[in-house]
Image (spheres, helix red, strand yellow):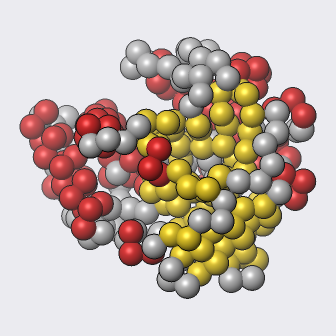
Amino acid sequence: MITEAERRAAAAALMQADHDRQPITQLSLTYPDLEIVDAYAIQQLWAAERVAAGARLVGHKIGLTSRAMQMASQMTEPDYGFLTDDMVVNDGACLDVSRYTKPRLEVELAFVLGADLYGPNLRVHDVLRATEYIVPALEVIDYRTEVPRAITDTIADNAAAAAMVVGGRVVRPMDLDVRWVAATLAKDGVIEESGVSAAVMGHPAAGIAWLGNKLAAVGRHLEAGQLLLSGSFTRPVSVESNTVIHADFGPLGSIGVAFR
């Protein structure tokens, strides 16, 4: 493990990298004793600074939900990050690509809770009962550290969360089979990726249950009203300036976002 002073220095370095849009050396190289518990502590310090600067915490994102991504990162479980109100943008937004380092987009479903969820031992049905509605989403991921990254680098870097776009049709969880939501992701009119939501741990709500159980281990819980990104069911697609992205979720509608 690393010291509290080192954790604070690491969080400050990440925040500066985010501000400057300039990746820093991997924290795992700067701090060879960095452990996963340190990485989440660094992430929490970053979140606290964002709140102190006026942002409001609105939820969480879950990453590494596919087995392939876990194996690539030498992990046996997902990771998670925080979401603030200034990270959430509406369908049809035009984002400035210079706000990011190397932005990429992923297709996801977002869950909005209507009731608190306390772990441990949460299951899919617990999540569905507590969910007020589900809405299509795109996550903008971006890294503030150089490659290659250890899992501790990714976790400390807020699980690469940069922004999210919400839109399409709002649905109640019992009104559809959440496992079989299909979507395509098009870049400048060309379909680059497609997928189905069952690719997220077999069921997107399984990721939410995992998160609730993970938070319970550190004395936290999922709160009513929180916005929860359940994990990507496509590979990420890179974007540049003058790029238009369109995600089609079929019966759940579509989302569009442009980058200038």
Residue 229 seen anywhere in this rendered image of the structure:
yes
Q: Where is residue 8 drawn, in percent x and y?
A: 16, 41
Compared with 245, 57 (above or below) is: above
Q: Residue furthest left?
A: 5
Query: In the figure, is residue 130 to the left or right of 215?
Result: right
- Residue in front for this viewpoint, 82 or 53: 53
Res. 174 image quadrant = top right
Q: Where is residue 71 drawn, in percent x and y?
A: 54, 52
Please identify the quadrant where the N terminus is shown: top left
Residue drawn at point x = 65 percent, y = 33 percent: 112
Q: Where is residue 30 drawn, in percent x and y?
A: 16, 55
- Residue in front for this viewpoint, 204 or 168: 168
How many marks the image carries: the answer is 0
Residue drawn at point x = 59 percent, y = 65 percent: 93
Residue drawn at point x = 49 percent, y = 36 percent: 58
Query: In the figure, is residue 83 to the left or right of 180?
Result: left
Compared with 250, 240 (above or below) is: below
- Residue in front for this viewpoint, 150 or 229: 229
Residue 194 seen anywhere in this rendered image of the structure:
no
Residue drawn at point x = 54 percent, y = 22 percent: 223
Compared with 123, 32 (above or below) is: below
Q: Where is residue 257 drawn, in percent x and y?
A: 63, 68
